[in-house]
Image (cartoon, rainbow, N blue to C red):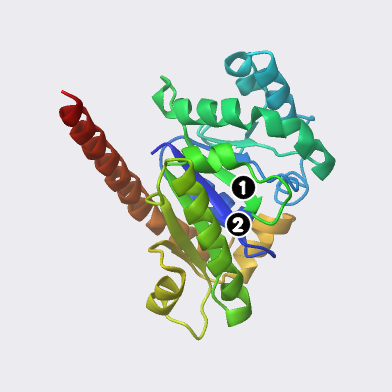
Amino acid sequence: MAVIAMVSAKGSPGVTTAALACTLSWSGRLLLAECDPAGGSILSGYLSGFEIPPVGLLPLAAAALRDQLANTFAHQVVDLDAKHPGRRLLLPGINDPVQAGTIRPTWEPLAAFFSELERREDGYDVIADCGRLTTSAPPWPLLFRADLLLLVVRTATLRTIAPAAAAAGLLRRELTECGQGAGALALALIGDGPYSRRDIEQRLQLPTVVELPDDRRTAEVLSDGGGRLRGSQRLLRAAASAESAVREAIARRRRHLAAASSSGSSHVR
């Protein structure tokens, strides 16, 4: 499945919670990479009850500068699944936004490394939590390389939807200017509101691939930790159901790119 990047316009629409829900509920081997330049939150939230050594994105970025990514990766991740070791991994993010400047020069090799993970013998799909576009230094190389780039939007009110229009426009322009095109861009909608899915798609001119409920009880555990995932867990069930749509969107995108490449090659010949 390769790389799925999640990003938001501004505020706190639930990017990290959505990314974690997908990581915990999807099949296959998964890496959740906290790539938010504003800092990661899973160690201090969902995993706050555990003693975890200082590992994560910052040491991995340092390894990228030494061309040691492959040798360092396994030592910088946290296992999220005690029942199935190695199946669901977390790459914790930076813990201080000041460190974003250190990471910035390494986004390109990090993005390339994430893209290659699915091809390893113990291949991983990557879900990258890229935070808000309003940060001073979004991880553009990672967003450009993503097989699917999900703009996360909370649908509760017009106030939560309106900023996504500008974000969608920015992402379309940046993806087009870098030569990737906007075909990988889609929506992840969270919650219910007065506007239908179709209304939001028409306003933002993007298709919806993921829809998640406003399951506050489960979201609080994923966000803040300190409890067990109990009850109906509507959020995790919806995230699990979204996997097939995500896989199909990526497969469709790859078929399109392969056809375009083949067409270009035939013209050259």
Quadrant into which the C terminus falls: top left
Q: Nearer the viewer, residue 63 or 44?
A: 63
Residue identifier under label 1: 130
- Does residue 104 lie above or below 18 as drawn? above
Residue identifier under label 2: 15
Q: Position of residue 21 (x, y in %)?
A: 54, 54
Disc on res. 34: none
Instruction: Name the image quarter holding residue 218.
Output: bottom right
Judge from the rendering whether residue 184 lies leftward or rightward of residue 257; answer left or right.
Answer: right
Q: Are marks 1 and 2 in contact (CB under 8 Å)?
A: yes
Dot 2 lies on which element? helix
Quadrant into which the N terminus falls: top left
Amino acid carrying label 1: it is Cys
Q: Position of residue 109 (x, y in %)?
A: 58, 25
Q: CA distance from mark 1 to mark 2?
A: 8 Å
Is residue 153 among the parts visible in the rendering? yes
Judge from the rendering whether residue 188 lies leftward or rightward of residue 183; answer left or right.
Answer: right
Q: Position of residue 97 (x, y in %)?
A: 80, 44
Q: Position of residue 211 (x, y in %)?
A: 45, 65
Is residue 51 among the parts visible in the rendering? no
Name which residue lies at 48% across and 37% down: 145
Amino acid carrying label 2: it is Val
- Does residue 133 lie above or below 102 as drawn? below
- Of marks 1 and 2, the one in the foreground: 1
- Mark 1: give few (<14), some (14-19) or many (20+) Cα within 10 Å: many
